[in-house]
Image: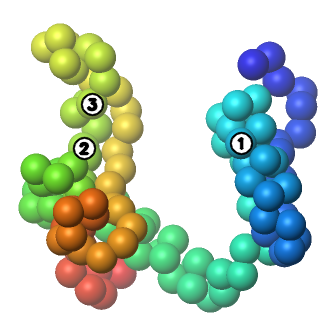
């Protein structure tokens, strides 16, 4: 990698050239592992609302978050120290705390059912 002083790759989705955007995304992932998206078409108010709901969920007590612990389809809440190589070997896991969801129609063979926090936790 070695890109300590390099600029973060920016992907502009306003371009009608989907092939160029796809190549840019791939190259950004190969070179950096991540990228920044502009002109994605998602309303700012919706994004702020989603961030607020996310913050609200992760600020809840652990027992409330664990009510949505990862299910057999690997969808749901993952607490810190749960994943990682050391956790698999009986040691301490990593600091990752996340909530896994997937796209598509819930419950079909390719898209297992998502778990969702109760509405209005914010």
Of tags 1 and 2, which is closer to the observer? 1
Secondary structure beneath label 1? helix
Q: Earlier in the sequence, mark 1 or mark 2?
A: 1
Q: Which of marks 3 and 1 is nearer the N terminus?
A: 1
Q: Identify the residue under disc 1.
A: 26
Q: Position of residue 4 (x, y in %)?
A: 82, 24
Other-residue count near label 1 (Cα within 10 Å), few / some / many at <14 / 14–19 / ≥20: some
The residue at 10%/50% (across/down) is 72
Q: Position of residue 11 (x, y in %)?
A: 81, 57
| Viewer can see residue 60 | no
Q: Residue 79 carries which label?
A: 2
The residue at 51%/71% (across/down) is 51
Of 99 and 79, which appears nearest the observer? 99
Q: Distance between the residues labelled 3 and 2?
A: 8 Å
Q: Identify the residue under disc 3.
A: 83
Q: How far apart are marks 1 and 2 (CA)?
A: 30 Å
Image quadrant occupied by the C terminus: bottom left
Other-residue count near label 3 (Cα within 10 Å), few / some / many at <14 / 14–19 / ≥20: some
Q: In which quarter of the image is residue 93?
A: top left
The residue at 89%/39% (across/down) is 7
Other-residue count near label 2 (Cα within 10 Å), few / some / many at <14 / 14–19 / ≥20: many
């Amino acid at each position: 990698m070695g890109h300590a002083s390099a600029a973060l790759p920016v992907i502009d989705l306003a371009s009608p050239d989907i092939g160029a955007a796809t190549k840019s995304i791939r190259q950004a992932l190969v070179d950096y592992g991540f990228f920044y998206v502009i002109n994605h078409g998602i309303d700012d108010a919706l994004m702020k609302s989603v961030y607020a709901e996310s913050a609200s969920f992760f600020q809840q007590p652990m027992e409330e978050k664990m009510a949505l612990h990862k299910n057999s389809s690997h969808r749901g809440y993952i607490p810190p120290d749960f994943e990682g190589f050391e956790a698999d070997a009986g040691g301490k896991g990593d600091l990752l705390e996340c909530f896994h969801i997937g796209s598509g129609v819930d419950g079909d063979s390719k898209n297992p059912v998502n778990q969702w926090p109760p509405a209005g936790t914010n």
